[in-house]
Image (cartoon, rainbow, N blue to C red):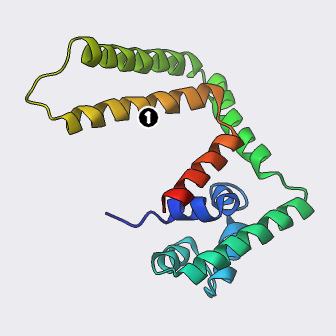
Amino acid sequence: MSFDWRSLLSTVAPGIATALGGPLAGMAVSAIGKALNVPEPTQEKIQAALAGATPEDMLKIKQAEEQFQKDMKSLDIDLERIAAEDRDSARKGAVASGSYQELFWLSILILSVTVTTECVVLFVGYPEALSDIVVGRILGLFDAVTMMVLSFWYGTTKGSQQKDATINALSK
């Protein structure tokens, strides 16, 4: 299993992690590189540095996050607005390409399969040959896909991201 450095970064420095996926990726890499004393930082070097990060390094990254947020504010850059525009552009792109109807029907299909599967498991049951873990994983997968469909159509909130970050921090 590979090291999930982006997940770690999104917990410790959500603003920098958000910037990594957009037009401000260079600034984000630079901020993390400076915090971890990585010369000529790249995403690969950042990943390697995070794999061996110490608690002191995590504190430096948190401080880099705070400075990054201040820098974004002083430059009048709103990361949440950029993320919202990115989600909105995905929807607009679907409309412009004509695949909007296809996505709508795919979403209906996904939601129908999810509801049907969960109703069957709830009211009919499942074969004894399947373990509870397998059934739980299948239902969990359907739940995750359903959330992705709903997030595409309705978006997500900054509060939800902050809640997730808090839960991740408390669980560690």
Q: Position of residue 101 (x, y in %)?
A: 55, 15
Q: Residue at x 65, y 74 (%)?
A: 61
Q: Residue furthest front?
A: 170
Q: Residue at x 67, y 25 (%)?
A: 96
Between 69 and 169, the one nearer to me in the picture:
169
| Snapshot quadrant of residue 39 | bottom right
Q: What residue did someone put label 1 on? A: 144
Q: Residue at x 69, y 82 (%)?
A: 34
Q: Position of residue 140 (x, y in %)?
A: 36, 34
User: In this picture, is 85 found above or below 51?
Assistant: above
Q: Residue at x 58, y 60 (%)?
A: 11
Q: Position of residue 72 (x, y in %)?
A: 83, 62
User: In this picture, is 111 found above or below 169?
Assistant: above
| Snapshot quadrant of residue 70 | bottom right
- In this image, 85 relative to 154: left or right? right
At label 1, which amino acid type do we have? Answer: Ala
User: In this picture, is 109 found above or below 24?
Assistant: above
Between 128 and 20, the one nearer to me in the picture:
128
Circle count: 1
* Secondary element type, mark 1: helix
For label 1, count other residues whose C-alpha is less than 10 Å away and answer few (under 14), some (14-19) or many (20+). few
- In this image, 28 relative to 133: left or right? right
Q: Position of residue 42 (x, y in %)?
A: 58, 75
Q: Quadrant of the N terminus?
A: bottom left
- In this image, 80 relative to 101: left or right? right
Between 7 and 93, the one nearer to me in the picture:
7
